[in-house]
Image: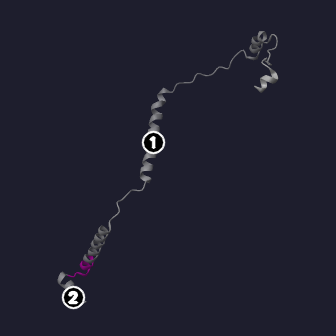
Amino acid sequence: MYIEEKVGKRNPFRVPEGYFEQFTAQMMEQIPETAPKQKPRAKSIWLRPVFYAAASVCALLISATVWLALPSEQPSASPMQAQTVQQDESDTYLDEAADYMMLDNHEIYSLLADN
């Protein structure tokens, strides 16, 4: 409202006399007579299946890389299972040692009784 009080409601913008009569002529002078011709773009419809196949192979390789890079989750063994595994390993070790020394059960019992 402040601007209306200072300037009023008159339009301060004016078009010069004869501007639109000469406008068309001036514009036509500025446009070049021959426009540069653009080559028609060749349609490469036959290449689309090749691009689709390449994109599919890339997606397959990326997903396989990601899948192989992820750590595999193995269930953790409970303490009872760990103890059983440890006993099995020690039994296997004793069996292998007895086979190596060619001891039979009777000799093993006598060795254990001496200690």
Picture coordinates of residue 79, whole percent (x, y): 32, 69
Instruction: Describe residue 85's horizontal placement relative to residue 67 as left or right.
Output: left
The kind of secondary structure element at disc 2 is helix
Seen as rendered, the residue at the extreme left is: 106
Disc 1 to disc 2, C-alpha distance: 69 Å
The kind of secondary structure element at disc 1 is helix
Residue appearing at x 76%, y 17% in the figure: 30
Picture coordinates of residue 36, whole percent (x, y): 67, 20
- Main SS class of the magenta portion in the image: helix
Instruction: Describe residue 10's horizontal placement relative to residue 52 as left or right.
Output: right
Magenta-drawn stretch contains 57: no
The magenta-colored residue range is: 96-103
Q: Amino acid at mark 1?
A: Ala
Give the vertical position of 100 relative to 59 (above or below).
Answer: below
* Residue contact at pointers 1 and 2, CB within 8 angstroms: no
Name the quadrant containing residue 101.
bottom left
Q: Which residue is mark 1?
A: 59
Q: Amino acid at mark 2?
A: Ala
Name the quadrant containing residue 9.
top right
